[in-house]
Image (tube, rainbow, N blue to C red):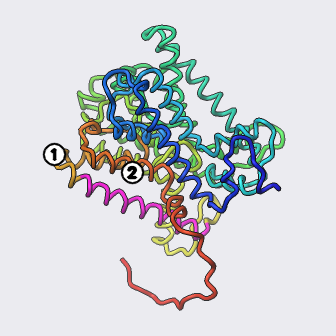
Amino acid sequence: MGGTERVGVLPVFLRGPITPAQFLALSFAGLIALGTALLWLPVSHASGDIGGLDAWFTATSAVCVTGLVVVDTGTAWSPFGQVVILLLFQLGGLGLLTFGTVLAVATGRRLGVGQRLRLQEQVRAFDLGSLGRLLRAITLIVVGAETAGAILLYVRMAPVEGPGRGAWYAVFHSVSAFNNAGFSLYPDSLVRYVDDPVVTLSTIALVVVGGLGFVVLVNLHGRFRGPGRVRLTLHTRMVLSMTAFLVVAAMAVLLVFEWNNPNTLGSLTVGDRLLASAFQAVTPRTAGFNTLDYAAMVPASLVVTILLMFIGGNPGSTAGGIKTVTFHVLVLGVWSVIRGRHETSVFGRRIDHRTVQRASAIVTGAVLLGGAAVTVLALVEPDIPFLALLFEAVSALGTVGLSLGVTDDLTGPGRVVIIALMYLGRIGFLTFALALVEQQRRRPHRFLAEEVVIG
């Protein structure tokens, strides 16, 4: 009965033959459809009539925690519409299945093996037996982080917006930051807070915690909680080391490139320059907020930002992109080939060759998909500069939400391309591929190997 019983809010069709990857893809598509219908309703509009395509674009951006917008979130949508958007990126960030199972576990009901397998696909957990503990930890992390963030943001936003409106702004931006959604109720994102350490550092903390990945957070808690401490896994060490490297390296590069740019860092004090560069080093890895105008940056800074958006956050988190561990594994694999080694290793541990192959497949798929999308965008949007289209496409694919200000200039076909990129970028290339094909049977034989010339 474990694999077939109905659990809490989980739908009965989970008992069917549908695979975890297929359910994940369909659940996001279903949530996007529901969000589109709700945002298309007149009650969701604050002024004017928002068409179906714009509602679809906004719903996809919210569910896929991207943050690209074709209408201003703070003025175009009514309070009801803003609540819908918040719920969409909260559900999209945590994942429908994770959210539903958290509620099921909270009621004390048992999970079947099949449902545990489906949940494992989404949160990238390593041990089916520990999923209950993992989900309880996720609940505490989400509630604790978003509440703490909202309190800190309220201190700065309430004096400007008023107590009631300030509370809503604080909650909205806290949830958006933790889920790496990038949605803001301000038309300039957070540019007005470029010199505010409370807003800037609070947002950075929320983005980093939300982007670390729940498995990493649980592992860190187990490592430092006292007696009976567990060791840091290889996955956790790779996540922490790559995250630290990317933040420090990106911050240093942006400081060098933008230090004397009067339209970005050049007009700020030394302390504010450090604060702003740290913010812009963190948020391109799928958070989508900005305190500097990216359209005013030098081209070299935009190239660095595109690379950060492409890499994204960490596996099993609210972030998108190809993921830091994927990038780390690929770099290690290339380094092993250069050094003539047959195995890929790091931190005294060997990485399975199948993991290296999957990392290569994900990166290759992302490059091919992104290249095809940019080509189509260049055809349907000839009046928009190529760098702006490339920036927009990578931002959508990495579910980031940063833009050079051309999102609302896209035509209908261009917006459909961005919608497709946001969806594929959120559910993941490997998951999408698995959702399209049935699991292959093991071949009864192997083909003969033959060498080919490469390079």
Using the image as rendered, state which of residue 66 and residue 301 is in the foreground.
66
Using the image as rendered, state which of residue 138 and residue 442 is in the foreground.
442
Q: Which residue is painted at 56% across and 50% down in the image?
A: 315
Instruction: Determine crowd level at label 1: few under 14, some 14-19, many 20+ residues with C-alpha closer than 10 A.
Output: few
Q: Disc 1 marks which amino acid? A: Asp
Label 1 vs label 2: CA separation?
21 Å
Quarter of the image where one finds residue 354: bottom right
The answer to whether 222 is drawn above or below residue 369 in the figure is above
State which region is magenta: 352-377
**Residue at the spot of label 1:** 383
Q: Is residue 363 magenta?
A: yes
Quadrant housing the C terminus: bottom left
60 to the left or right of 236: left
Q: Which residue is painted at 49% across and 28% down in the image?
A: 203
Q: Disc 2 marks which amino acid? A: Leu
- Asked which secondary structure carries label 1, the reply is loop
